[in-house]
Amino acid sequence: MEVKDDVVFKGEHLLPQQRVCLFMGRLMYSACAKDCGLGAYASIMAASISGYTFSSVCYHSANSSSDHEGFLLGEVRQEETLSISDSHIGSSEFLNVIEVHNHEPCAQLFSFYDYAGNVNEENLNRILKDRRKNVIGWYRFRRNTQQQMSFREQVIHKQLTHILGIPDLVFLLFSFISTANSSTHALEYVLFRPNKNRYNQRISLSIPNLGNTSQQEYKVSSVPNTSKNYASVIKEHGTEFFDKDGVMKDIRTIFQVYSALQERVQAVCCEVDQSERVREKIQEEVNKLKEEIALRKRNSAEEERRLQEAAAVTLPDNPALPDSSHSSLTQVMLSGPSVEPSLERPVNSSSPPIYSTTLLPDSPSAILLPRPQAVGSPGHPSPSLGLGNGDGSSSDSLNRQATGQEDQEEDDDEDSSEYENLVSEQLQLPSLTETVTLGRPATLWPDGDAHSPPGS
Amino acid sequence: MAVSAVHLESDAFLVCMNHALSTEKEEVMGLCIGEHRLADMTGRPMRVVGWYHSHPHITVWPSHVDVRTQAMYQMMDQGFVGLIFSCFIEDKNTKTGRVLYTCFQSVQAQKGSEYERIEIPIHVVPHEAIGKVCLESAVELPRILCQEEQDTYRRIHSLTHLDPITKIHNGSVFTKNLCSQMSAISGPLLQWLEDRLELNKHSIIKLQKEKERLTQELASL
C-alpha cells in the first residue's frame, strides 16, 4: 500500500483491501467488490418497470374479479460507481438495478400453490416454461387491503426463493382502493425485498418515460459573432452536415430509423390484433359450449328429479338413481379450471345436491363479484384512516405499515389479507356486500381537497 | 342532466394509462370515444363522449382551469365527462407509488359564480381482448410525438438567420429527441406488443384444447 500520508490520508484508517496509488496528482483507486467495512461500501437499490408493463398489470388486474398475480421477468444488475470525497476515502457505491422487463400473468389464483402456501414446482414450471430463468420476482394485485405482505405471501415467497434459487427475489404489491362513490380510485404499489433485513425492505420503483425531452432546447438565434474567421470556417466545414437541399443529413437518417421502427410497430400490432380476434372467437365458442353443457345437465337433472319424485309418490321403494347423473352433477359443482385438489369437497352420492338450483353456466371461477366500494376489510378498522395528510407526508397509519406490521398475529393476517377476493373458493363467497355499504369518508383521500391544486 | 356513471372498458383504460405514463414532464391529453346508454338505445354511432388528461406529480383533482375547460365542453354536450390520471406520485417515506384516476363534470353553483366539480362514479369494466381501436390508439402515440417534433423543427428550420453551428445544434436536438422517443416509447411499446402476441398464442392453444374437451363432453351427454 503506497500512501503519502501527509498529502491525502490525514489520519484516516485504510483497510488492507484498498490500494490507493498517488501519482502525479491523480488519485487512482481500485477496490474489491466485497464489503470493505463501514464507510467504504454503500449499496443503493433502484428498480424500474416500463409504463407498458405497469399498465399491462393494471389491465390484467382490471379484468380479474378476484385478486390477480403473476411473475416479474427481468434482470438484476450491479453497477459500481466510484466516488471520491474528502470524508470517505474511496467510497464505492454499488447500485443494484432491478429492471422489470415484462410480466407473466397467472390465469387464476392458486395455480402454483395451495391454501397452506405450499408451492408446487411442477405447476410453477408449467406456468413459467423457459421463462423461469428470467424471473426476478412476483407480484400480486389486491383490492382494499393493507400495503404489506400477507402471511401466506411470505410463505410462498420463501419457497419461491428457494425453488427458483433467487436469493434476492422481489415482491411487487398492488393495492386498489376507491372512494365510497367510486368516482376516484387509487392504485398503490410497493416493491418489497422480503429476504433482506427489515431495514432495507422497500425499494422505490421508477417508471422510465420521455421525461425531459424538451423542445425548448432548440435555439432560435445564434450567438452574435462578427468574426469573419469563425463564419468562414464553420461554413466551409459545416457543409459536411448538410445535403444539397440544405437539410441536415442526420435528420434524414434518424427519421429513416424512426420510420422503419414505426413500420415494424405497426406490423406487430396487426399481428396482435389478429391474435386478439382469434382468441376472442375461441373464447366465445368455449363459453357457448359451457353454457350448452350446463343447460343439458340442468335439464337432465331436472328430469331425473321429476322422475324421482313421481316414482316416490307411486312406489314405496325408490329405484336407485343411476350413478351417472349424480356424478355429472357433482362434476358441475366442483369442476373448474385447474382447481387444487384440496379445494374439492368430496360429495358422496347419497347426499342431495346442494347447488342444483344455483348452477352457473360458467365455471365457478367466473363468478363476478361486485367490486368493493369501500376501504378496509370487514371486521377490521379501516387501516387507511388517516392515509395521507393531503401532502403525502406519512401519517400514523403509514408509519405503522412501513415499520412493519409483520409482527401481527397470523390469524389477523389471514383474515385481513385473505379478504383477497377468492373467487375460486366456490363454497365460500366473501361477504362483499357488506363492504359496499361501509361508507368511506371523503376526507380519507390522499391529496384531498385541502391541498389546493397548483395554478395551471 | 349529470351523468350517473361512466364505464371505462379495461382496454381503453390500458391505453389511457400508457399515455399518462409516457411522460412525467408534461400533461398529456386525449379524447374518449364511446356512447351514451340512455333508456332508449337509439343505436347511435360511437362519438367523443369525454376527455382525459394526466397530472404527473400533482394531485388528481382538476384545477380551476380544468373545471372551466370541462364546463365549456359541457356547453356543447351535457353528457361530456372528464377523466384525470394522476401518476408519478411517490411517498418517499413508505416508498409507495401511486396512480390515481377520477371522473368529474362541472356545475355552476349559482348563476355567475365559478364552476365547481362534481364527482362522477367510474368503473373499469373487464374486456378480455384488446380492441382494434385501442391497439391503433396505442401505436398512434409514437407517430404523434414524432409529428410534434417535426412541426417544431420545421418552424426552427425556417429561420434563415441561423449560422451553421446553430443549425447543426438544432438538427442534433431533433435527432436526440427522436432517439428519446424511440427508446422511451417505441421500444417498450414494441416489446409489450411482442409479449402480448406470445401470450395470445399460448392462450389460443389452451382455449383450443378446452374447446375440444368441451365438444367431446357435449357429444357424450
Image (cartoon, coloured by chain):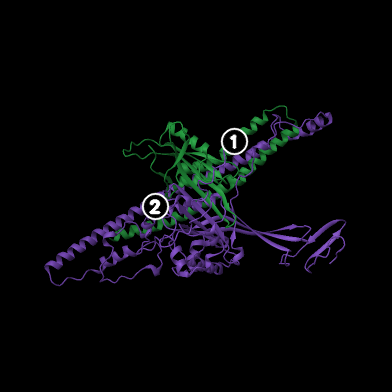
Chain colours: A purple, B green
In the image, taking residue A93 as reference, residue A140 lies left or right, namely: left
- Whether A375 is drawn above or below A328: the answer is above
* Element carrying mark 2: helix
Residue farthest to the left?
Answer: A314
Please tell me which residue is depicted at 28% across the width and 59% down the height of the picture: A358
Please tell me which residue is depicted at 32% across the width and 39% down the height of the picture: B39
Please tell me which residue is depicted at 71% across the width and 32% down the height of the picture: A243
Q: Residues within 10 Å of mark 1 (few under 14, many from 20)?
A: few
Q: Position of residue A164 (x, y in %)?
A: 56, 67
Q: Position of residue A150 (x, y in %)?
A: 49, 65
For disc 2, the marked residue is A283
Q: Are marks 2 and 1 on the same chain?
A: no
Chain label for disc 1: B
Quadrant occupied by the N terminus of chain A: bottom right
Give whichever of A267, A228 is nearer the camera: A228
- The amino acid at mark 2 is Gln
| Residue B114 in view of the camera | yes
- The amino acid at mark 1 is Glu
For disc 1, the marked residue is B148
Q: Residues within 10 Å of mark 2 (few under 14, many from 20)?
A: many
Quadrant occupied by the C terminus of chain A: top right
Q: Single out the mark in the foreground, 2 or 1.
A: 1
| Residue B200 in view of the camera | no
Mark 2–mark 1 distance (CA, rounded to whole Å): 40 Å
Give whichever of A368, B1 is nearer the camera: B1
Q: Position of residue B28 (x, y in %)?
A: 55, 40
Residue A203 location, quadrant? bottom right
